[in-house]
């Protein structure tokens, strides 16, 4: 079945450091891929998405490229801020009606 | 624009009690779903609905019931609460009823503790 695997955290970075959170997926066909962010005490919010191979999703300085050859959708940001501290979830949706989420990666950015 | 509204925000139940978690959305979304979030396990789908009158089971449906009498509302019922149901519950909705580009919109969650 479809599934998402993302790197385990927690991740702690200094402000202005480079961020990579790895995400790989297993799915038949051509799923759409998403990154969601969850701030403390809140629900998940869409951060970015990509709907076909080689698409790059971007938002708020974050980027992720849909790589079908490596079945990956790694999240990157060139310079993190304290306000980026949150839990990040990789997710996919395929031709069915179910979204599949990774287990989440907690990021803490220290000044 | 309220989006997805969940009530209550917090709830404590004793084993065997019943309750309903409420979820309402004002975006005219066809697709609605319930997830539970547990440490180290991410989000797991409990039940979902692709439209009024239609519901289906997700990954972890046991112990939970749902109904979808209107497009706006999708309540989740716990008939006899168990400690294993202690979790944070999220309701989410989406414009499309199957796959595609539409992202999920989440409520702020209900933190449930069963003692």
Image (cartoon, grey):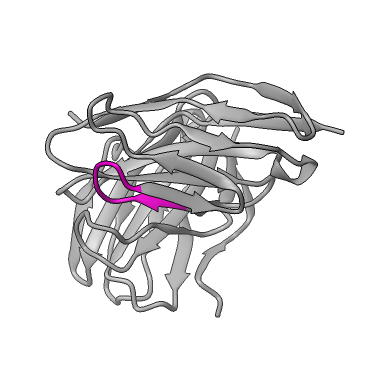
Taking the spot 50% from the left edge, 43% from the top edge, the residue there is: A63
Q: Quadrant of the C terminus of chain B?
A: top right
Which of these two is toward me, A52 or B62?
Answer: A52
Task: Give the prevailing secondary structure in the magenta stretch.
Answer: loop
Q: Is residue B47 left or right of residue A63?
A: left
Taking the spot 34% from the left edge, 55% from the top edge, the residue there is: B33
- Asked whether B25 falls inside the magenta stretch, the response is no
Q: Which residues are magenta?
A: A48-55
Considering only vertical position in the picture, is B22 above or below B48?
below
Q: Quadrant of the N terminus of chain B?
A: bottom right
Outermost residue toward the left? Answer: A29
Q: Looking at the image, can residue A23 be seen? A: yes
Which of these two is toward me, A19 or B113?
Answer: A19
Taking the spot 18% from the left edge, 69% from the top edge, the residue there is: B53
Residue B31 is situated, as x and y percent measured from the top left of the image, at: 28, 63
Taking the spot 29% from the left edge, 40% from the top edge, the residue there is: B61
Considering only vertical position in the picture, is B107 above or below A19?
below
Q: How many marks?
A: 0
Considering only vertical position in the picture, is B49 above or below A100?
below
């Amino acid at each position: 079945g479809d599934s998402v695997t993302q790197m385990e955290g927690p991740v702690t970075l200094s402000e202005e450091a480079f961020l990579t959170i790895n995400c790989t997926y297993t799915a038949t066909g051509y799923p759409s891929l998403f990154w969601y962010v969850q701030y403390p005490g809140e629900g998940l919010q869409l951060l970015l998405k990509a709907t076909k191979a080689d698409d790059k999703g971007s938002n708020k300085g974050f980027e992720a490229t849909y790589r079908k050859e490596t079945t990956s959708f790694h999240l990157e940001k060139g310079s993190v801020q304290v306000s980026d501290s949150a839990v990040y979830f990789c997710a996919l949706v395929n031709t069915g009606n179910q979204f599949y989420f990774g287990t989440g990666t907690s990021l803490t950015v220290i000044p | 624009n309220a989006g997805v509204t969940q009530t209550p925000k917090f709830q404590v139940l004793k084993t065997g009690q019943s309750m309903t978690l409420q979820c309402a959305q004002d975006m005219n979304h066809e697709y609605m779903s319930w997830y539970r979030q547990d440490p180290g396990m991410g989000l797991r789908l409990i039940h979902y609905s692709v439209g009024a009158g239609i519901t289906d089971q997700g990954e972890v449906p046991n112990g939970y019931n749902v109904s979808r009498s209107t497009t706006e509302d999708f309540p989740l019922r716990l008939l006899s609460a168990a400690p294993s149901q202690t979790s944070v519950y999220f309701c989410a909705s989406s414009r499309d009823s199957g796959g595609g580009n539409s992202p999920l919109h989440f409520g702020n969650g209900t933190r449930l503790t069963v003692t």
